[in-house]
Amino acid sequence: STLNMKVANHNNTGKQVERDYAASQAVEFRETGNVFEFGTYHGYTTACLAEVADHVWTLDLPNGGEGLSLEIAAGKDLGHFYKFHKFANITQLQEDSMTFDPSDIPPCDLVVVDANHDYEHTKNDCDKALSMLRAGGCLLVHDAHYPSVAKYLAEHDHELIPNTRYAKILLSN
């Protein structure tokens, strides 16, 4: 079934159907109400997740990666979209995911990985994501078609989600 998201947007930074799918997985796998996201960027997916989760933690580089090739477009703050909607259930973390320690995050129903897409970062982020999931939880990996992301996914049981750029990995009970 389709969710009617109040923060739906129709811009060119991604597909709304993908944001809706991520939110639907937060509902489908809901037990703890906790969701974690690697890669905030503008915060569109973050906002959609926050509509259906009790709490969302979202991680991105300090200052949105200022000075790096992945820097957010000038004039756009990290998470500006969810900040505009004034969600009270989002915690923005600013740290390199390579040094991030997930041990303070409670078990999550869903973790979404959409950050640096090279193999080293993908492996780091997804391995940490799997450690953060509750038994039976769901990991969504965005941009599954990127060769370095596909390499990681090939090492795991996963499902490619039609009409999206997501792959899903389920944590066994």
Image (spheres, rainbow, N blue to C red):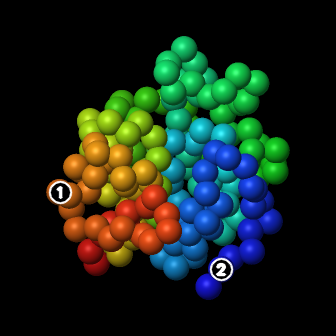
Direction from residue 145 to residue 120 in the image, left or right: left
Query: Mark 2 belongs to which amino acid?
Result: Thr
- Circle 2: element type: loop
Percent x, y of residue 155: 17, 57
| Labels 1 & 2 near each other (Cβ < 8 A) | no
Q: Is residue 167 visible?
A: yes
Q: Position of residue 124 (x, y in %)?
A: 29, 41
* Label annotation for residue 132: none
Q: Vertical placement of 48 versus 2: above or below?
A: above
Residue at 53% x, 60% y is 35
Kindly identify the amino acid type of the residue bearing the numbered disc 1.
Glu
The image quadrant that residue 4 belongs to is bottom right
Residue at left offset 38%, top offset 39%: 117
* Residue at 43 percent of width and 29 percent of height: 96
Count residues near mark 2 (Cα–Cα under 10 Å), then give few for <14, some for 14-19, many for 20+: few
- Residue position for label 1: 155
Helix, strand or loop status at disc 1: loop
Q: Nearer the viewer, residue 74 or 65?
A: 74
Residue 127 position within the rendered picture, expressed as x and y whole percent measured from the top left? 28, 50
Q: Which quarter of the figure has residue 15?
A: bottom right
Corner quadrant of residue 20: bottom right
Q: Quadrant of the N terminus?
A: bottom right
Which residue occupies the extreme left position in the image?
155
Question: Does 116 sit left or right of 7 as displayed?
Answer: left
Q: Where residue 2 is drawn, which disc sits there? A: 2
Q: Residue at x 58, y 19 (%)?
A: 66
x, y percent for residue 53: 62, 66
